[in-house]
Image (cartoon, grey):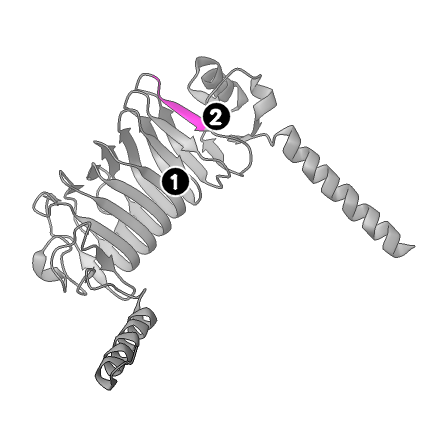
Amino acid sequence: MKVSRLDDNITRRTLFLIACSVLIGGAVSVADTLLIDGADPLAAASWDNGLPTAANPGLVNSGVTGTFAAGAVDSAAVPNMAIIIQGGTLTKADSGHLSFNHGFNSFTMTSGLFDGDAVSSTRVLQFNGGTFDQSGGLINWDGDIQFIGTGAVALNGGTLDIGSQLLFQRTGSSFDLNGGVFNVNSLELDADNSSLTFKSGSTTAVNVSNQLKFDGSGSTVNFEDATGTGSLSINGFDATQYEAWYTAGNLLFGGSNAAAFSSVFDVSGTTLTAIPEPSTLGLLGVSTAMSLLVRRKLML
């Protein structure tokens, strides 16, 4: 079949446009909307492409600062709101509550700063529904943080600092810990069958300066396995108190408290960690023995 010059030119132009789209892709898609420096994240005029939604996520980039309005504010007027903090700073500089409220979609943080420190220990940062995912950066809030409604909650990296309480009120849900550092004054698992879960391979360090409460029926702290270095440290605690939780079914290993406490957990000072499984220790032993054998042969 003979291709005309016109058809050939159209084909070349199409391929060129496709190549260009591939080269520039991955930066910011047409749907994304960028926060304008110094603006209020809950105001429509603060974004270059309209209010952020799941289909039109709001990006907070490096070098940008967003300041929430004074007083008690919430995102109820921003349906399906989705924010991704990948640099820069969001701040609440007064004592008013801040609520990501009904219809809220997602809060994602990979870098940057969410700053609500040194103002009031009685104010609340509330996530009513929607997902929460922190993999980097610093969240610094001096009051309470509340998770209510439904939606996945995960700390994968970065630092989560809460000056007062974390209230986890999502029935049947888990606060999943994969990495990062979590510092809190008081941690309350208020919802029935809720869990603070150290996921398989978790490296999260949880530091509680006051108390951890199991107010919800069936609420637990669960270490899925011992493949990570995740740890729980509660000020003033020792092995006796952790073991009492384990016996009561509030502290679990692999979702169970069937094994002897001393066979699955180790307590050093106030810090609880899971004991590596025998298979893991065996692999480490084999690796060490092989290294010594190779070294000996090289010396010979």
Residue 178 is covered by the magenta coloring: no
Q: Is residue 159 left or right of residue 262?
A: left
Q: In percent of the image, x 20 and y 64: which residue is there?
A: 30
The answer to whether one can see residue 177 in this image is: yes
Whole-angstrom CA distance, mark 1 to mark 2, is 16 Å
Instruction: State which region is magenta.
Output: 218-222
The answer to whether one can see residue 117 in this image is: no
Give coordinates of residue 2: x percent, y percent.
29, 81
Which amino acid type is shown beneath numbered disc 2? Phe
The residue that disc 1 covers is 183
**Mark 2 residue element:** loop
Q: Which sits in the foreground, 227 or 236?
A: 227
Looking at the image, residue 56 lies above or below residue 193: below
Looking at the image, residue 33 lies above or below residue 73: below
Circle nearer the viewer, 1 or 2: 1
Q: Earlier in the sequence, mark 1 or mark 2?
A: 1
Badge 2 crowding class, 10 Å Cα cut-off, few under 14, some 14 to 19, many 20 or more, is: some
Give coordinates of residue 235: x percent, y percent.
44, 31
Which amino acid type is shown beneath numbered disc 1? Asn
Badge 1 crowding class, 10 Å Cα cut-off, few under 14, some 14 to 19, many 20 or more, is: many
Q: Quadrant of the N terminus?
A: bottom left
Q: In percent of the image, x 34 and y 31: which residue is there?
A: 174
Give coordinates of residue 121: x percent, y percent.
24, 39
The residue that disc 2 covers is 237
**Mark 1 residue element:** strand
Q: Quadrant of the C terminus?
A: bottom right
